[in-house]
Structure formats: structure tokens, C-alpha cells
Image (cartoon, coloured by chain):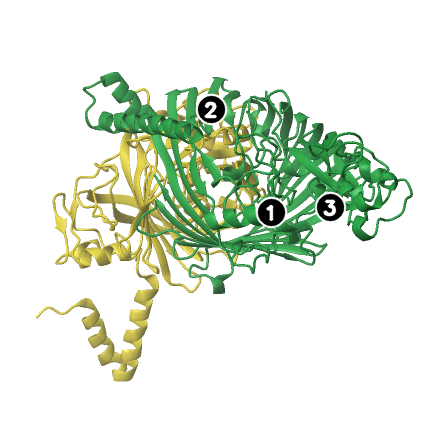
Amino acid sequence: MASNYRKLVSAIAANLLTALFCAHASAAEEPAVDHEWGRFLREKVSFSGFVENTTGLSISHGSHFFNTSNRLDMQRFTFQPEFNIDVAEKFKMFISWRFVAEPRYNAETKSREASVQPAGTGRALPWDFWSEYKAVPWEVVANVAPTDNLQIRVGRQFISWGETDGQRLLDVINPQDLTIAPPAAVNLFDLDETRVPQWGLRMLYTVRPVSNTILEFFANPGFEPKKQRVDEFMPTNDISDGKADGDLRYGRWSSHPEDRMAVARLFTNPNAINAAIIPPQFATAARTVVPTFTRDYPDAGDNWKIGTRLTHSFGELNAGIGYIWGYNPQAGDMVFKTKGVGCLPPATGPLCRIGAAGPFLPTTLRASLVNDQTNIFAAHLNYPIGDPLGIPIKTALRGEIAFYPSKPYNISEFPAKNCTTGQVLTGDFAARAGPSCKHSDNLVEKNTIRYALGFDRSTYIPFLQDDPWRAFRMTFQIFQSVIMDHEDGIRAFGHASKIRKISTLLTFRVGTGYLGDTILPDIFFGYDPAGYYSVNPGITYQPPWNEKIKISLTSAIYGGHNKYSGLGFFSEKDSIFLKLRYQF
Amino acid sequence: MRVTIPERIFRRSLSIFGPQAAIIFFLALILCGFAVAPWSIIAAEPDLKPGEVIGTDNWQKIQGMVGESFLNRVKAGHKIQIKEPKVYRPLKEYVDATEKYSGKVGLGANGELLNYVAGQPFPKFDPNDPQVGQKLAWNFFYRWLGDDYKTGGAVKGGKILRAVIEKDGSERRADLVSYFLFPSTRYSLNPKPAIPGYEHIDYIQLRVDSYPRDAAGTTTLEIRYKDPTRADDLYIYLPSIRRIRRATTTQRCQTLAPSEFNLDDINSFNGKITDFNYKYLGDKKILANISQEHLPFNRKHGDYLPLDEKWHIVDTYVLEITPKDPNYCYPKKLLHLNKVTFDTHWTLMWDRRGEYWKEQFGFFTPVKLADGREVWSVGDVVITNVQNGRTTIVTATRAYNQGYPASMFSLATLQSVMRGGSIE
């Protein structure tokens, strides 16, 4: 049924595109058919886009749990037609569709089903990683300028704040689909390809153009349908939410889906608390919690947000302050909230027992992944530093800061404790982390500050260049997140990895071009002083005889001292990608 | 038998100095010749007539009137035809402003302009004035360029067509659009002569890449300040991340790949006037084309030579530009300024080893203002890197005095650029 629907939508979209394209082409040749439309299409409509194929191969040793997990991990075909329409001088439109076909490697599917799927509790893995055949445009915006100073953009769009490179700090208006690309791999897919567009309105009012004094307002009313897309990289116990909508995918970038921490153990298990009353022969079964996670993207009304920002230049310093109020859809900021507990059927009662004297069955827990309503206070600045005191610094400095008051976090006990006795659980009950004894809902709210400083510089390194004046672009960034009044046990929502009071990430990027920019190397490094790193080198070839073709070879490499934390999560997913792209 | 001039010099020196000294003297002469080559300021009065065709058999007639690389192509078989010259008249408003304001204009200790309002700063100058080079540079900088313009606005399709040609003839295209606003030297559009609040700004440029698709939408906002100590502001909107990034403009020599231009090569010379020294080398007749007929000019794919454009003689001032910064990429750059329009026709550049590096020629073409008056605009510009063999051609005819609002040249515009490069 779903397949037929996809085919139907694809056929309609393809016919529509073909008709538009042919109309455009025929208009260019023979406008007699419909002179006015022909002229409009010829003069006001431009057609562009790209076709792309990306193949990824895991080059790491893989996991002993899967016999196929270190093989093909991406085979994605993307077709994105785009139309620019200059309806009038003050009214322009842009429409694009994104069609993606990315099948899952069949052997891997079978292997994962056999290895991971708890027997009888889940469903088959879907055949694809990512399929996008919607007739709804990927992006559709109308840009209207009622006055010289006012720009209004309405439609499904991207709104981006901030200036950081490769990472996002103030760029929290649109969510990012973390299933699309491996983390910190900016040379594989740029942000524009991993963000998710949202319906909304954006207004920019230029109060004083000479000083770039601009007042901005945006509103995303929350018309986006449910879409599972934000948490898949996390090594959660990823079993079905019970809905037959094909949203069970298993994150490709979860390095250890087979070793996933049983997230359920991080939540309060009513039976475990009362372990003392469970007969010893049933203790092992009774402590088990089988979680049922619903990970619905918040429905309309639950993901609305509004924001405003004022920017201004003070001499050479450009700065701005902003405020966002609404729901924060960013993957890393979501939390699991307990929605209820139950028993694995046919067990019933507080002890999840079959009948009055039957065996104990695992309890169930319904934990919903939610993005909380939040306030974000934001500010940014940028300033060029030339040659102060004759020292050729020649660097652009930029900074961003975001303050999240009362930001929610999941919290646990490290290691797991019996909250009644306060004793660390041992033996079969031992766990790296367990339910929080202090916060029964496993949640805590903390004021949080995140900031970034960036330094951008172009540098000549003549001995490394065929053209000594082709500069190397270098960017160094430091990101820090500070949790005020920090409590031990605060962790990321999907696993048992602690979040420290101060988290730091350093990035460095360097890129240049050779032979008239036909060869473009670029490398992005990420380093967490806690002992993790990522390296993302890429090299692109653009043939000198055709500007439309691009061939890229990219690699995403990760490492760290602990493969259950930080960038170490991905240490067994080192991959190499070949991307072929044709622009039109 | 006809004896050539070099031969005569050699024979004469032989008789005066003897064989060894004569050879040294002759070699020295040749070296001196190379030192001024490829462009000799001392050129004979050209013997060129309209309709005449220059080719392999008579290329000597244009020696010194075109760039060396171009001349080599003529020597190798390319033919050019001479036509009647076209003369443009300066715009009345510009002449009026010159008369009104130029009397008070002077130069400061560091070559900065004092008391300048609008028009040509130094309409009268003495060739023997030690500051004549600096004055010519300011005349070039404040030449008439309209109150605003859209580069590429007068090209079919409304954008700059840019072709990048490799040494082997491979060719790529990369199109863009550029908008200039001159908010403090306005001659036709109100408010005049300056938009209130913008008196400290010489120009603002908004540049939008439009092709190929991945580059389309990349937009820069560049602001040039009158303050000689303040560097330009540069903001870049990157569609790949949909963010605006600040950039420094102090690395002005970096190649704007894939083209052969750098930041200071735009409009022949785009450096901050006070960052350089200038020397007036004399007057010179050169070959140019200020009435280009085809936009872009017809050429063979993979080659930059115009096939059916004709050339004519133009009177120019030759201005030598040397940087104050010893690390600058061009230790010497020569501009050939049209004596009427102060636009450049040939621009020649040398590298830090003293070797000939790039040559650039620009065609001009007549365009109309809204009131029907004819003015001139750059047509095709060709820059050739003679060392690596790459050439960039841009067809960049301007549409002047479009009445762009100042608010268009702000960061708000960068944030509203469409993915395809379209802006309001």
C-alpha cells in the first residue's frame, strides 16, 4: 500500500517536473503555443538542482555481533530539482523537491534482525534507511518586500542564526536530521543537506542600513507532521514504538547497537525497588524493564517557536542579541520522560506476575522522547582583526553564546543503587547506571550556558601550493557548554554516558584549492579534551572541462578511550564515502 | 640591403669599443630592453589606419600597444582589424561637480584626499608635479561610474558571464551578479551628492554567485570606507550552511579561484589608494576597443581571443603602481588610463621575482542611461596569467543608475538571498 502510494506520488511529481521542464524548454524555442506563459517561463523561471549518488563503506573492524556491519553503510541516490521564480520585482519564489532512495544493505538487515531484535517483541527492519518521495516541496518560500526596508519570507524554509563552522550553537531553529550523515562529517554533507525545513515566517526589517541595524522576527507555527529523525544516532534500545508506520530503522551511526545500554535500566523500575519482596528464583526476570519508547516528533502545537533578534554594527564590531521561545527540536537537547509503567502481557499487577502464583514477567516502561518548551537567550559578535601594532593577525573573530534557563536533563545514579538501602547493586543487579534516587522522574532542570569562539584566517603557504597566492582557509573553534549547579549523574538522554559540568569541543579546519580549484582538499578535526577525536578529510575533483560535475572522496574517522561515550561511540564506524554529483 | 637599428648599434659600438666591450654593451642593451619589456613607454607614433589588418607580417606595428602575451598570439597568426576610434563625452553632471568641488581638493601627507566631495578630484595637473601619480590615481578611483550599477545588468540574462579557460583549452563557466552603490558621490539620483549617513563610505558592493548550482547564492557584501586607516568590511553568506560569515579583507592578494583575479584586480585596480605609491610614466597611445559590438565577443571555445572585434587607438596616461607593503603580490602594476573616462584598457602585472605575470585588457561598450544619454561601460574583460596559462573572461556590462535603495546593501539582503542566487 505504502509502496503504491510512493509510486503514485513519484509518478505525479515526475510528470509535473517533466511538464514544467518541457514547457520551459519549448518556450525558449517556440513561444507561439502560449506566448505569455512562454515568455514568463523563459524570463522569470529558472531551473536548477542536482543529482547525487553517495556510496559509503565502513573501513573499521566492525563488531563481532554483526557479520556484515563493517560493509556498505550508505548507498544513497538523491535528486533535487529546484525552481526560482521571479514573479515580480518585489515578489520571488523558490521551490525545491528532494527525492531520496537509500536502501538498506540486505545482509545487514538480516544480520541485525537476528542479532538485535528481541525475539517476539519487535518487527522486521525496513528495507530502507531513507526514502523521500513526498509531493510536498522540500523547501518552498515566497519572498516579499512590501517596502525597501522590509523582507518577508513565508513558507517551508530554513532559518539559521550564528556563524559557527560545521557545528551548531545558535543554529537551533530548524532541527537537524542526524540519520542523514555521520556526526562531525561536514565534508560529506553540509548543514544545508542535513537540516530539516520547517513551515514558518521570517521578517527582516532594516532599521538603519548603514550600520546594519536589523530587527528580525520569525515564527514556526508547528505545522510539521511527525517525523522520526533526531535520535537515531544514539545507542538506544531501539525497538518499535508499536506503530506500523515503518519508523523502526536502527541508527547507522550508533556504533554499538548490539551493545546498547539498556536504557530502561536508567528509569525507575517499580519492581526493582521492591526487589526484597520478589522470590529469589524470579529476581532476575523481575528486575528487567522492557521499555517502549515513543519517539514521536512533537505534533503540531508542540513544536512551535517564535524568536526575535536585533543586530547592529558598532564601528567594525558587528553584534546581535536574540531570544527564542517555544519548543526546542534539537536531538541533543531532548529528554526521555516516563509516561507510564506496565507489565509484559499476560502478566498483570504491581509485580507483573502471571496469575497469583505464576512466574514474574518483565515490567514495561513507556518513555517518550520529548523536546521541552524552552527559552533561549542568544547573542553573537564578529570582529575583524587586521594588523594591530604591526602584527599581521588578519583574522576574523566571532563569538556566540546561548543561555538556556532550566534546561531539562535526564539523570541517573552512577553506578546503579538500590534507592531504598542506598547500596550499590552487585551481581546480577549490577549496572553502570541506574534510576536516580533523588529525582524519581529521572529529570532535572539546570541553567545552561553554551558558547563558541571562532577564528578564521586565510594564510599563504607557498611551498604547499601550485599557485602561491591561493590561500589556505583556516578555522579554529572552541565550543563549551557549562551546566550551572551541576549534579553528578546528568546524562545524555539515550545512554548512560555522563555529561560533565563543562563539556568542550575544539575544532580545526583547513582547506584550499589546487590547479585552478579543480582539486579541493579540506580537512575537519574535532577534539574533545576528555579524550575523543574525529577526523573528516575530504577531497573533491571538479573537472576543468565541466563545472557541473563534482567527485568527492571523504572519510569519517572517530576515536577515543571509551567507545561508550562521546565521539568514541562511533569508533567502530569509520567510513569512507564516494560522492558523485551532477549539478544542472 | 637594409640594416636594422640593433645591427647599426652593434656595428657602431664595435668600432668604438672593440669586440669584447661591444658585445657586453650590446648585451646590456638587450637586457635593458627586456627590463622594460613587454611594455615600452617610449613608443613611436603608431602607423595604423582604419580597416588595416594586423597579423603575422606586420605585428611590429602594434608592438608596445598591446600586452606581450596578446602580441605573441598575433605573431602566431591571430589577426586584428583597426577601426575608427569612438569618443565618449563626460557626463554633464560629473563635469559640473568637478567644476564645483575640485578647486578645494588637496592631498594629505600620506597621499590621502582632502576636502573631496564629488567629481574628478584633479582635473588639471602638471606632469612635472611630484604628486601627479597620486593625483591620477585619485582621478581613476573617482572616475564616473554612475550613482549605482548592476554589473552584468546590460548583458542578456542580466548577469556576469564568467569563463575560466585552462592552458589546454578546457573551459568552465561560473556566473555571478554584482551590484555597486556609490552613496557619497551621486550625480543623478537623489539625494545628491551623498545619502545622509553614508558620507564616510566610498562604495558598497553586493556580489551574488548565480551559477553553477552549488555556488549559486554565495553572496558577499563589501564596504569600502573613505578612512584610509580602515580596512574594508566583508561579509559572506554561504548557502551551504545558510549563515553569514565575517571575513578579513587584508589578504588582498589571494586568488579568487577559479578565476585569475584577486581582490585588487577587480575593475583593474581595486586597492586602497593610500596603500600604494604611484608614478606617472607618461602618455601613450595603445590599442583598445571602447565600442565592443558583441556581448560576449565571439571566440573559439577554449580560447580568449576575440574573433570579430575591431580595435582602435586610444590616448592613455600610464600609471605605475608600487605597493607600500613589501610583501604585496604585485611589486609593479601598470594601468593605462583613458584620458577622457579614466577607465583602464590594459593592465599589466609583474611578480615579486620581477617576471611578467598577468595581463588584462578590457573592452568597453556604449550603454544608455534612463534618459537616453549614451555612456560607456566595461564590456568583456580578459585576464591572462602568462605564467600558468590560465585565462578568465568576464562579460560584465553595467546597467547604471538603477536607483537601488541603501537598504539593499545590508546584511538583511544576505539573509534573504534565494538558493538560486536571486535577490530582491
Question: Which of disc 3 and disc 2 is earlier in sequence?
Answer: 2
Q: Considering the numbered disc 1 on the image, is that residue within a helix, a strand or a loop?
A: helix
The answer to whether tags 1 and 2 share a subunit is yes
Identify the image quadrant of residue A392: bottom right
Q: Is residue B226 visible?
A: no
In the figure, what tint was chain B given?
yellow
Front residue (pair A240, B194)? A240
Image point (41%, 47%), residue name: B265
Disc 3 is placed on an element classified as: loop
Residue at 65% x, 42% y: name it. A237
Spatial separation of the CA atoms under disc 2 and disc 3 = 41 Å
Residue placed under numbered mark 2 in the picture: A141
Q: Is residue B215 above or below residue A244?
A: below
Give the label, 2 or 3, closer to the camera: 3
Q: Which x, y percent locates residue B53?
A: 13, 49
Q: Do tag 1 and tag 2 residues touch (Cβ < 8 Å)?
A: no
Q: Is residue B267 left or right of residue A491?
A: left
Indicate the chain on which mark 3 is placed.
A
Residue B22 versus residue A82 in the image, above or below:
below
The image quarter in which residue B377 lies? top left
Crowding at mark 2 (Cα within 10 Å: few <14, some 14-19, many 20+): many
- Of tags 1 and 3, the one toward the viewer is 1
Q: Which three-letter amino acid code belongs to the residue tagged 1?
A: Val
Which quarter of the rendered picture does the N terminus of chain B lie within?
bottom left
Q: Which mark is residue B344?
A: none
Label at residue A496: 3
Q: Which chain is in green here?
A: A
- Residue A61 picture location, percent across and down: 56, 60
Q: Position of residue B15 (x, y in %)?
A: 22, 80
Say if mark 1 contacts mark 3, CB within 8 Å. no
Residue A113 visible somewhere in the drawing: yes
